[in-house]
Image (cartoon, rainbow, N blue to C red):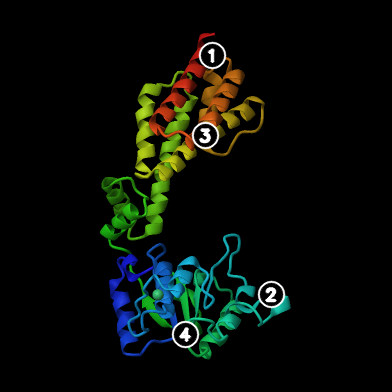
Amino acid sequence: MSWDHILGHERIVAQFKQAAARGRLGSSFLLVGPPGVGKYTFARTLAGAFLCESSPEEQLDPCGRCPSCQQVTAGSHPDLDVIAKPADKSFIPLEFFIGDKDHRMREGLCHKISLKPYRGGRKIAIIDDADYLNPESANCLLKTLEEPPPRSILLLICTSENRQLPTIRSRCQIIRFRGLPTNTVEKLLIQNDLASDQDQARRLAELAGGSMQRAVELADQEFTDFRQQLLHYLAEPDGDNVTFAPILNEFVEQAGKDAPVRRRRMRQVVHQAIKFYRALLRSIAGQPDVHDQCLKNCLHRAKSDWSGIDETVADCLERSLQALDHIDSNANQVSLLECWLDDLAHLTRRAQLT
Ligand SMILES: [Zn+2]
């Protein structure tokens, strides 16, 4: 963990360092900006800078090596509390702030931040998804903001300051994050193995409008597009595996250079085929139609065009499950996928001939 990993927000880093050097740091900050630009990573690094045991606070420069920095990276520092909205909730639950019914004001973020620091010189709390504070939570938080415990730092992360109560807004220093420059998104995509090469990274970055999150979603969109191609190919009774193999290989290579990310993508692909064959078996057995329009069309196509369908589908499913087993043990990914496609083509063609 260090500022080197914070790309595109050098101006904000400099602003904090200057304030620290002059001993004029506030205690409550509202980090505002579009989703996916690195506000959370910034907040964690800032927490690390405050808690670092080998770099003086006036420098605000986390060393990344001391026990404190390591605990911040591992998410186990006793003086750093992070809360966020659980995926299945519409708000951050009140108990995250003040403890559950049996432990009111004895647990939760507002309680923890008021305690004496264990090892660092400060108590720090990060509230991710602060867009989702319900009025009760916002009021509890307000009490903490009105009388911040000594040496406490509170970092609220949100996408719009208008989503905060005016009373919260006025008690925080507002730090505005802009969208990331295109070349920064490009660099991050490559660094994090989310794009296979410079070309793909540049294309995704240009479409992402300064948001890493959007870039990652777009990379997933490529999977959606490929999935459509794959389903259409699988539904054909005499699909041309020689033409399709290079398309599949290219898609796997796009995942990145390292074997683990490629294997992950191969599993994704084979999983889609397994899902297709299973859905086909269910459809043949008269089970209701699926909602996914592309899958639905492909199932209909296979049902009307394939001969000896029951047995063929069962064989293709078995062969795909076998391929899935082999992905982790087989070193040669290209030949593994080619053999799989080849066998599927033989199985479906054999059925057409009988
Ligand atoms: Zn350190």
The one nearer the camera, 272 or 2, is: 2
Label 2 sits on residue: 100
- Sequence order check, earlier mark of 2 and 3: 2
- The reply to whether callout 4 and callout 2 are in contact (CB within 8 Å) is no
For label 1, being within 8 Å of ligand 1 is answered: no
Place of residue 192 in the rendered image (x, y in percent of width and height, measured from the top left): 37, 54
Label 3 sits on residue: 324
- Sequence order check, earlier mark of 3 and 1: 3
Q: Which mark is in front, 3 or 1?
A: 3
Q: Which mark is in front, 2 or 3?
A: 3
Which residue is at a point 53% across and 23% down the rendered structure image? 302
The quarter of the picture where the N terminus appears is bottom left
- Sequence order check, earlier mark of 4 and 2: 2
Q: Which mark is in front, 4 or 3?
A: 4
- Mark 4–mark 3 Cα distance, whole angstroms, equals 51 Å
- The reply to whether callout 3 and callout 1 are in contact (CB within 8 Å) is no
Tell me the tag on residue 351.
1
Tell me the tag on residue 121.
4
Q: Residues within 10 Å of mark 2 (few under 14, many from 20)?
A: some
**Of the residues shown, which amino acid type is indicated by label 4?**
Gly
